[in-house]
Image (cartoon, rainbow, N blue to C red):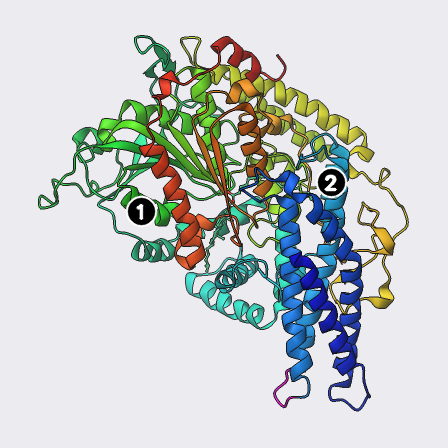
Amino acid sequence: MEYKVVFAALKKVCEDNIAVLGGPSDLPYGAVAKRLVTCMRQIQEHCRALEPVVASFTAVFHHYDFDAQTPGNGYRTLVKVLLSCLLHIIHKGRYIASNYNGAFFRADHNVSEMEAYCNALRQLRALLHLAQRLINDNDHGELYCLQDQELSNRFVQEYSSMHKACFYGRCLGFQFSPTLRPFLQTVVISMVTYGETYGKQQSGFGLAALSLLTSGKYVIDPELRGAEFERITQNLDMKFWQSFWNLTESGLLTGFSRIASSPVQVNFTLTVPPVTLRLPLASDPRLTATVSPPIAHWGPGPVNMRLISYEIREGQDSEELLAYSRTDPPPISASHFPWIQKQPRSPWLLIHFHGGGFVAQTSRSHENYLRTWSKELSVPILSVDYSLSPEAPFPRALEECFYAYCWALNNCHLLGSTAERVCLAGDSAGGNLCITVSMKAISSGIRVPDGIMAAYPATLLTTDASPSRLLTLIDPLLPLGVLAKCINAYAGMWVYNACECECALCVLFNMSALSGTESQMAQPAVESGSLSSLGRDTAVLLGDLTQGASNWIQSFLDPMRTTGGARSLSSTPRGSPSNETRMTSTRTSTTNCGSRTDYPEGFEPLRSECLAFIRPTSCPIIRNPFVSPVLAPNNLLRGLPPVHIVASALDALLDDSVMFAKKLRDMGQPVSLTVVEDLPHGFLSLLQLAKETEVAAEICVEKMRKIFQKENPPSALRKRPKLEETYQSSNPSG
Ligand SMILES: CCCCCCCC/C=C\CCCCCCCC(=O)O[C@H]1CC[C@@]2(C)C(=CC[C@H]3[C@@H]4CC[C@H]([C@H](C)CCCC(C)C)[C@@]4(C)CC[C@@H]32)C1
């Protein structure tokens, strides 16, 4: 009953503060005392309403866990985040009550902090009410709101109008491990500074000076920082996010990570030309399957990848491999350094797909943990630099990753491995690609990998609501506005997003641009042999696109369907400005926000000044099993190797992991789920920053070790579905 203790402590703190501050008016800081008392009263009121909600969540949230040993799901997370906010308030409140009369008490600072947490609490209360709706509406144990599109869309609308700035100012990252908070602060300050200088035509020096000046004001003024962050996440386009996220590619940061992480003997990029590959069939190695090079959108093209190996191994310095390298002078090899002793080929091979929302980053930005993995597992790693969206929407990245996987199987001897055991590993978007590449291997009839380690994978790319996804409101790394842009880019809907205008001309223009994509996708798959599923996927996609286009026109003709305005539950704006916390950039009325949601007891969250234009994507590509594997029919997933998922309890995509793991388990597929505490999405990229991220990354390493060491039956002997069955189910219309 941990929550009861927290609520009791908070009540006491509120009472103590009100008693101290609400006393005789000759106390110092009169106006400040008044603000603090108002604040404490509001906190009391929120807590009164929240305690029964938390009690109801606590009574049922174990039903949503993967299993009794793995507590973790969005409902637990929401309670955890709320309690963490309350603990901050308790801590602050106790400090204020005992130091208020002290000579060094910083009255303004402390009241602003308390107000910020009070606002955060108010918004969290709204999230908990929304989550309560999900509990009521969803089937037992179901975390997503898949059946009720209307409810999901309404959540997105509601989300778009809610105030978020309080989570990016003083309260930034309060939910995460304290050691990570200074880093998150630095990221947010860098992001808003970058946002301000982004697009300005300045020389390098001018830009540096401007950035320094701008960042100063955001360091000093957390409210300004929060408001600016909110504006940026809602308004800036995909190019900005790509450009900011790609800072991890910059020489300075990669240089730093190279110093901080293990040195490796082999680290260079390869470019594999597009040639048709032949691979033995898993069921009968005397027969072969043909795998065409990636073709979607612009026809056959090369695939880039990076080979990382802690020790140089046989084959890695071969002429044949170096011919694939475009580096000039050629990458370091044993022939350049004859004193380095070449190791024999490893029996293991790790193939890695990086994260970055399908739109940013490369193997280079993920090098810091890849080097460590290569050292700890003593394994060569091939990390694929797949083409990014929006330039290369689905299925290009998947085709390239699958092709790279096939090429690596055929050429493992060059990579320093005998590939007796092959593991796929990836984080976030890369985790999604690990799963979908394996599904492709199954449907092509070729060898499937021996295991998958997916860190915080995205398994459902729709904007369907789930309790953990509600956290996108407060997450500094994964705000919903940005995620929606990633999804649209990967689904090939970025042209539409390029213009937010709803006018008929723009919509028609965007439609025609869309059909342009469609016709490009219509290129026939160059295949021989019925086993490759590339052509089939393209056909499925075409079907999807046509369907998407008609849905789109439908939604354009029927605005009520997209705004959800007429179907909202209540038309009366709620909220009482009189008991508002001082908040300059927010409003409480829902007028103009296009969505109203019923909250109990006249409660109303704070509203944002600038509305986000988040469009729940209606394009059916997003429901394709090779995009959202959690929606895949069982026969596309049957035959997957053991899947080890490592997720974080505070990640907005936690429910993706839980639901996917449950799905596999219910099918009888081998799967494990580990939920680590208090870390943000993308914790692998933060490896060197805190003990907790190191521990979490170590769990990932152990999962991969398990895949490599386990005496599984060879993948060919694993039970797999009949091929005809697989093909049929990969076509949603079939
Ligand atoms: C209310 C209704 C709810 C509906 C919710 C719908 C939600 C949609 C759900 C699923 C969609 C999934 C879409 C795909 C998800 C992909 C996620 C995905 O891949 O996310 C990754 C995106 C890159 C990133 C943010 C990340 C991790 C680490 C980050 C990096 C850490 C440091 C890096 C800085 C640039 C360094 C700068 C240092 C400074 C100069 C000091 C930073 C921030 C770069 C970005 C990454 C996670």
Q: Is residue 104 magenta?
A: yes
Residue reaching furthest to the front: 1
Secondary structure of the residue carrying tag 2 is helix
Instruction: Between residue 638 and residue 359, name the one nearer to us.
Output: 638
x and y, in percent, of residue 448 in the image:
39, 22
Secondary structure of the residue carrying tag 1 is helix
- The C terminus lies in which quarter of the figure? top right
| In the displayed structure image, the side of residue 458 where residue 280 appears, left or right | left
Write the residue at 33% across / 8% down. Answer: 287
- Rounded to the nearest angstrom, the CA distance separating label 2 from label 1 is 42 Å
x and y, in percent, of residue 120 in the image:
69, 61
Reading the image, the residue beneath label 2 is: 134
Q: Which mark is residue 200?
A: none
Image quadrant in which you'd find residue 166:
bottom right
Write the residue at 9% across / 43% down. Answer: 338
Within 10 Å of the Cα at label 2, are there few (<14), some (14-19), or many (20+) other Cα atoms?
Answer: many
Residues in magenta, as a range: 102-107
- The N terminus lies in which quarter of the figure? bottom right
Instruction: Between residue 296 and residue 563, name the one nearer to us.
Output: 563
Please, is residue 93 above or below residue 386 in the view?
below
Write the residue at 45% across / 56% down. Answer: 692
Reading the image, the residue beneath label 1 is: 371
CB of residue at label 1: within 8 Å of ligand 1?
A: no
Please, is residue 193 above or below residue 137 in the view?
below
